[in-house]
Amino acid sequence: MAYSATVYVVNCGHSMTITPHGASKTAFEQAVDVIVDGLSAKVLADRKTELASVILAGTQETKNKLAEPGQYQNITEHCGLAKAQFESMRRLLEVRPADATDPAADLLSALILAIDQIQSVVGKKKYTKQIMLITDGTAPIDWQDLPDVQQAMLDSNINLIVLGTDFGPDGADPCDDVNTKEIMDTNAAMWNELSNAISERPVMRLQDAHDQSMGFKVKQVKPTPVFRQHLYFGSEGKLQLNVHMYTYTSAVRPLALKKWSTLSDIMVDNNAASSSTADALKLSHSVNTVRRKRVKKLDQPGNEGAAAAADAMGGLDDDNLAMETAEDSAFLNNDEENVLERAYPFGNALVMITAEQEAFLQLETTPGLWILGFYPVDKIPRHYYLDRVYLILPGPMVPDESGPGLDALSLSMSVNEVVALVRYVSKAGANPKLGVVSPCTEFGVNLLQFCQLPFDEDMREFMFNSLDKVSMQSGNVITQDHPLLPTKEMNDTMARFVKGMDLCPPNAPELYVPEENFNPAVWRVNQAINARALNPSAPLPELHPRLVQQTRPPDHLVRENADLIQSMAALFNCKQVESDKKRVRYGAPGDLSNMPPGALGDDTTNAPAGGPSAGNDGDSEAKRFKTEESSWDLLL
């Protein structure tokens, strides 16, 4: 899990309203874009350990905990150092730079406030601490406390990134005003000195940082061991190596829209349901589940008739709820957790299993990796490999043995072209998994990698018709001169087409390199969430031109093979299928005025007054309740 604390300090002075040369936005707008990009990544990650805050320097008012008369003036803590929220991003978009008559703020004082935030919230915890300061070089700064500030950041292990609007690693930009030029030169030299001393990097141009934030970025992930145990040889495990396992490759999936969607369900108002212009009430997305637990005490004397009646009626419901006696209600209210036992559904009944029985049925396992045997690489089909791949490295325990032992094992497996079949248990009590350990030499050292394999009952075999022969009902096998079989001309034409569309042509750079391509679905979902979170009425963003290009074949290859494509269309007798039916997308909005009552899920026309569909006495949002009721027979 990532542990990070980032404080953004941005200059809101009037000088930030200038548009830099070659840019389409002002310096302040670029700064806000950079900050919003950083905050949105933390919000979408949704981790409590990723903290962020924003400090505005140069505001008309003063709101910070270090403010005193004559010190830390015109500095505002926009949001405290906490988990990033979309609300703070929305408020940041509403901030405007100060007027020309407003006093400027001391950026070094704002930096001290940022250091105090990190020290107060994070302290000595092992967080990645960072301050990003965005400013221009025109405002005068009191550099008297610079040595103390530098030492405080070094002691707290705080990284510093300075983004300059009119200065960079090569100094300040030209300026006609002599006094302003002198201030800019001093500020540029001091910021570069502080940044080099703390982060060993010079000041970065804001325009360059803005271009990077608006483009595609490769997310840096801190490696964290997911398995800290031993690799055992043989079933008895007399020979063992301490190893750590890290995630090597894993599938990236878009965020769940159920959590981030801002779409609202609607329902027709009960009082205006008969009108064609019925008012629509907004429903919240949260579903409050109401669980009603009822126990049928069928084993008690004298209760057989009630049990039979309940069974005949299909169990207890709201209509016959009054049939429960006072003793039943008292029994239910006085139940305690320590006298209850678990029950599991079996058909239409519940079977009680005690804790002792569960412990007896539970498979007791100990964590570890056990090598069951070695097999040739070609004996395990490629499609047997499941899920993600993990990298196995030597562990810190007894490194003099685990390091050379793992290196020798990987080297011997690579030379003999074999893999190891292993039994993998991630933690105590977990179900064992079958996997394969293979050598990995991509990093210049001999390591191992693990991938899960299916068990025999997990395998499913599907039979498909052969592409090079046709089996007749009479038992004859036809291999040529059949409408379902390709001719030699078709095979030759397809071979030329595949060769012509090669993405790795000789003496030419490779096209669509995986490291340079990004998942369009992940990017679009993230951009849509950010756009609608900041502005609910904003249109969905268009797909980036670079991603559009990824979804299409290269233009030069299409042009070079245009004649071949036309000849293939004629050879294979390809025809376009025309369809007159208009496809209706699932969930597409439509006219709600002519919808019949009850079409929105619940029969709101017959809903009782004060029910879920009637709202909560003026509440703008009505709550939905999902009732879960069970009338199980408890088998004792």
Image (tube, rainbow, N blue to C red):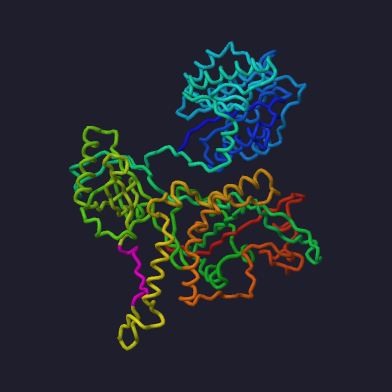
Q: Is residue 94 above or below residue 506?
A: above
Would you say 277 lies left or right of 514 here? right
Q: State the residue at coordinates (59%, 57%).
A: 326
**Position of residue 197 measured from the top left corner of the image (x, y, whole percent):** 48, 19
Span colored in magenta:
456-468
Q: Quadrant of residue 491?
A: bottom left
**Residue 38, image quadrant:** top right
Asked whether residue 145 is in view, the answer is yes
Q: In front here: 389 or 51?
A: 389
Seen from the viewer's position, the closer of residues 389 and 593 is 389
> Residue at the location (57% across, 12% down)?
145
Q: Quadrant of the N terminus?
A: top left
Residue extending farthest top: 144
Residue 457: in magenta span: yes
> Is 137 on the left-hand or right-hand side of 51?
right
Across and down, in percent, residue 361 comes to 33, 56
- Side (left or right) of 193 relative to 617: left
Quarter containing the C terminus: bottom left
Residue 69, x across and y down, in percent: 70, 13
In the image, residue 399 above or below residue 438: above
Q: Is residue 166 above or below residue 361?
A: above
Q: Main secondary structure of the magenta part?
A: loop
